[in-house]
Image (spheres, helix red, strand yellow):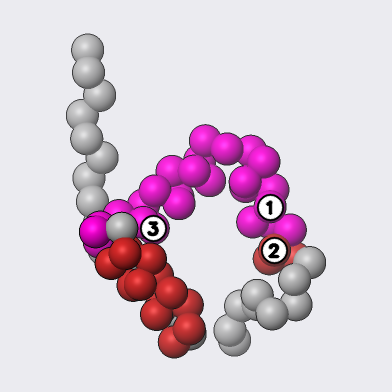
Amino acid sequence: MAESPRKIVRFSLDLDIEQKNFLKLFATNNDIQAAVVLRALIYCLETDVKLANQVLDAIFIEPEIEEED
């Protein structure tokens, strides 16, 4: 039995202007929507332990990537 497609829901994300511009340019240069890029990145986090650990390192080691209060 084939899996049914995942239901798409809206998710809001605050980015600084440089990140937003980078994402939009990346998507435009590759003729895809920015949301597709973000969904692919999340898929990679779900399936790639090494990448997931790199993201965690960026969050907890890199001082410029911090949550806003």
Q: What residue type is labelled 2?
A: Ala
Viewer-proximal residue among 8 and 57: 57
Question: Which tag, 1 or 3, sits closer to the chain's start?
Answer: 3
At x 74%, y 58%, the residue is 57
Q: How crowded is mark 1: few (under 14 residues within 10 Å), some or many (20 or more)?
A: few
Q: Are marks 1 and 2 in contact (CB under 8 Å)?
A: yes
Label 1, label 3: how many angstroms apart (C-alpha)? 17 Å
Residue 38 has which mark?
A: 3
At x 43%, y 74%, the residue is 22
Q: Is residue 20 above or below residue 35?
A: below
At x 75%, y 65%, the residue is 60
Label 2 sits on residue: 58
**Residue 35 is at least partly visible in this image:** no
Label 1 sits on residue: 54
Label 1, label 2: how many angstroms apart (C-alpha)? 6 Å
45 lies left or right of 23: right
- Residue 45 sits inside the magenta stretch: yes
What is the magenta segment's predominant secondary structure?
helix
Question: What range of the chain is rendered magenta?
Answer: 31-57
Which percent across, then down, holds residue 25?
Answer: 35, 72
